[in-house]
Image: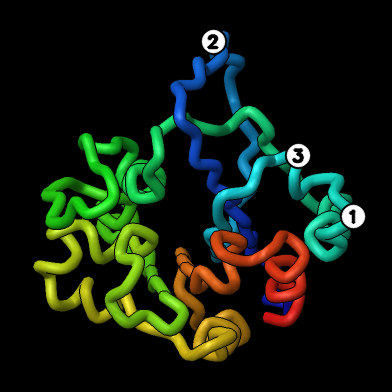
């Protein structure tokens, strides 16, 4: 992947579609006073698909992803069990709730992460590689009427050419959006292709 500017964090989400609910561990959080925060100018999420954590992390078939680990962090227990549906995973990532969604549900009238960003003056853009209307269940901006029904927001959710040169150009620009989402095609996101080819694709971006 071509290097982004300093102050950018790139997140790879490997969404795992399971057929059972997974109990989340309880957390004990105490208020310890002042927290030293780490701030980022840009957050980029690249949504990969349908692979177990153990099928990627530590797997020799994904040398590029694993080469990033010394400079990275992983969250092995950050997962959910939304049965048999990619769409509910994406809806939850963008809005914090599935709203009972499953593949084929559209026009969800609910707030999303965009409603948290815009009032703070933070910019965003979403890219969908070769977006043509197929696999809408992998394209969160197309699922919410709070985005599709708002022309200014809808204009920030765009189709990208194969291999996403538009995304790379934005990352290398001085005015890259604060929050950038990228949905690769199913031929690149490990949904219909192997871990190895998905890893090679990411390295080539």
Q: Position of residue 124 (x, y in %)?
A: 38, 69
Q: Does residue 75 appear anywhere in the picture?
A: yes
Left-right relation of 136 to 201: left
Alpha carbons under labels 3 and 2: distance apart: 23 Å
Residue at 13% from the left image edge and 59% from the top image edge: 145
Q: Is residue 13 above or below residue 32?
A: below
Alpha carbons under labels 1 and 3: distance apart: 11 Å
Residue 180 tag number: none
Residue at 86% from the left image edge and 45% from the top image edge: 58
User: Which-is-in-front pick, marks 3 and 2?
Assistant: 3
Q: Earlier in the sequence, mark 1 or mark 2?
A: 2
Q: Marks 3 and 2: CB-CB under 8 Å?
A: no
Q: Would you name the residue on which mark 1 appears?
A: 60
Q: Would you name the residue on which mark 3 appears?
A: 54
User: Quadrant where the C terminus lies?
Assistant: bottom right
Q: Position of residue 32 (x, y in %)?
A: 61, 15
Q: Earlier in the sequence, mark 3 or mark 2?
A: 2
Q: Marks 1 and 3: CB-CB under 8 Å?
A: no
Residue 26 tag number: 2
């Amino acid at each position: 992947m071509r290097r982004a500017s300093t102050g950018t964090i790139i997140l790879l989400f490997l969404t795992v579609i399971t057929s059972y609910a997974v109990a989340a561990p309880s957390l004990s959080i105490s208020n310890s006073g002042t927290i030293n925060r780490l701030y980022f100018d840009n957050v980029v999420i690249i949504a990969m698909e349908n692979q177990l954590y153990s099928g990627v992390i530590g797997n020799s078939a994904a040398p590029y992803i694993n080469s990033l680990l010394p400079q990275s962090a992983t969250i092995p227990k950050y997962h959910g069990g939304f049965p048999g549906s990619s769409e509910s995973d994406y809806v939850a990532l963008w809005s914090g709730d599935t709203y009972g969604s499953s593949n084929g549900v559209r026009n969800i009238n609910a707030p999303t992460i965009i409603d948290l960003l815009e009032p703070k003056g933070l910019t965003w853009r979403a890219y969908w590689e070769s977006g043509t209307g197929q696999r809408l269940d992998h394209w969160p901006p197309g699922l919410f009427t709070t985005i599709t029904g708002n022309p200014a927001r809808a204009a920030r959710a765009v189709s990208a050419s194969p291999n996403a040169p538009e995304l790379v150009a934005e990352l290398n620009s001085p005015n890259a959006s604060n929050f950038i989402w990228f949905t690769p095609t199913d031929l690149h996101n490990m949904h219909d292709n192997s871990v190895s080819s998905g890893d090679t694709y990411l390295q080539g971006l």
